Image: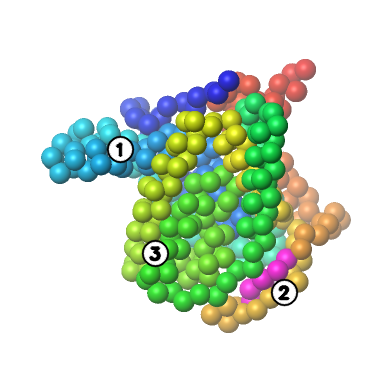
């Protein structure tokens, strides 16, 4: 039986607004890191279907309300308060954390610790969301397909590309489509398209023209793709969620913390860039391993705690009580 997520599409209380802002902040923080999806955070934190429905509500009816200057009806039609609260948190995370996370990703030890925490988050998400799927032959096959697809995507070597406005627009469309899919990172799609460093630098430097172009592409892409996702969730909920769980499972390969670089080059700034990595066993005797393991466990427990607070049926908590 499909369990509906709590409806936050029309927040009324300060607590609901604060929750949405914090969820948006978590989504934004995740989206900055290549390999982690903001859609995963939305799924974990119980607003995924609300988000898809809110985005889909930007349709012809909304345009008619806008042209008729019926602003109150328009705000209800497009779940305006929901999107503003979520967007405020997401934008705050991008503006406040982009420089920090960029520096952390450039530091080998910091990268391990960051990825360990996110690995725990995504691993727990697979278990908690997977427990809500009614598993049968079709959902299992869809899960495998999603896992394979995500694995292939995260192992594509990043490309060099120009930064024309047309290419940036298309990149924004592709990245936002990935961003709302749990398990497939929008920032990693930008990396594959050769735009990640350029866009992150533009955000850090408040360089508005490329940010606006990417943003416009993202708006067009997310409105178009949200209709597809909404249709799939409404008609084929079980196999669609199984597919999304597969995306998350396939992404684990990318965010595994301990890696060795096999091929590298220099980016446009002359900085080192790894093109091909392989996962390796961690050095269990190092101090960083203990910290990384603690962060991985913390991320795992955090998701299960949040899921249990929302559903009261988290599989880990149920196992503990047995």
Mark 3 neighbour density, 10 Å: few (under 14) some (14–19) many (20 or more): many
Q: What main secondary structure does the magenta stretch of the protein show?
A: strand
Horizontal side of residue 219 vs 100, given as left or right = left
Residue ID at (64%, 76%): 272
Classed neighbour count for the residue bearing mark 1: other residues with Cα under 10 Å, few (<14), some (14–19), many (≥20): many
Q: Which residue is mark 3?
A: 169
* Residue at position x 64%, y 51% in the image: 149
Disc tally is 3
Q: Are marks 1 and 3 in contact (CB under 8 Å)?
A: no
What whole-number distance in Å separates the C-alpha atoms at marks 1 and 3?
24 Å
Please state the extent of the stretch shown in magenta in the rendering: 272-277
Query: Where 260 sits versus 141, above or below?
Result: below
Residue at x 62% of width, y 27% of height: 132
| Label 1 – label 2 distance at C-alpha | 46 Å
Residue 198 position (above or below residue 298)? below
Q: Is residue 151 visible?
A: yes
Mark 2 residue crowding within 10 angstroms, few (<14) / some (14–19) / many (20+): few
Q: Earlier in the sequence, mark 1 or mark 3?
A: 1
Q: Residue furthest front?
A: 138
2 or 3: mark nearer the eye: 3
The percent position of residue 243, horizontal first and vertical second, equals: 61, 40
**Residue designated by label 1:** 78
Q: Quadrant of the C terminus?
A: top right
User: x and y percent of residue 299 in the render?
Assistant: 65, 42
Within the image, what quadrant is residue 55 found in? top left
- Mark 2, residue position: 263
Q: Nearer the viewer, residue 240 or 16?
A: 240
The percent position of residue 59, horizontal first and vertical second, equals 29, 42
Q: Are marks 2 and 3 in contact (CB under 8 Å)?
A: no
Magenta span includes 261: no
């Amino acid at each position: 039986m499909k369990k509906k997520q709590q409806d936050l599409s029309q927040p009324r209380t300060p607590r609901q607004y604060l929750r949405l802002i914090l969820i948006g902040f978590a989504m934004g923080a995740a989206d900055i890191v290549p390999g982690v999806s903001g859609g995963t955070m939305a799924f974990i934190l119980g607003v995924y279907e609300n988000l898809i429905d809110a985005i889909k509500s930007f349709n012809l009816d909304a345009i008619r309300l806008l042209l008729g200057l019926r602003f109150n009806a328009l705000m209800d039609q497009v779940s305006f308060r929901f999107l503003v609260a979520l967007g405020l948190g997401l934008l705050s995370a991008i503006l406040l954390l982009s420089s920090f996370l960029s520096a952390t990703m450039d530091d080998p030890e910091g990268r391990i610790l960051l990825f360990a925490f996110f690995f725990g988050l995504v691993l727990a998400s697979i278990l908690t969301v997977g427990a809500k799927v009614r598993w049968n032959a079709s959902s299992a096959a869809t899960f495998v397909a999603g896992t394979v697809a995500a694995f292939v995507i995260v192992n594509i070597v990043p490309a060099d590309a120009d930064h024309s406005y047309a290419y940036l627009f298309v990149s924004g469309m592709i990245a936002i489509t990935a961003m709302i899919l749990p398990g497939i990172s929008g920032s990693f799609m930008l990396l594959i398209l050769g735009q990640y460093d350029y866009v992150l630098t533009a955000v850090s430097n408040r360089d508005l023209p490329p940010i606006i172009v990417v943003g416009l592409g993202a708006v067009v892409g997310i409105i178009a793709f949200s209709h597809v996702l909404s249709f799939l969730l409404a008609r084929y909920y079980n196999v669609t969620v199984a597919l999304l769980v597969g995306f998350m499972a396939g992404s684990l390969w990318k965010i595994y913390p301990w890696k060795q670089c096999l091929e590298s080059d220099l980016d446009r700034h002359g900085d080192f860039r790894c093109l091909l990595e392989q996962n390796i066993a961690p050095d269990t005797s190092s101090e960083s391993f203990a910290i990384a393991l603690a962060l991985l466990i913390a991320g795992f427990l955090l998701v299960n705690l949040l899921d249990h607070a929302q559903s009261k049926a988290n599989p880990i908590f149920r196992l503990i009580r047995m």
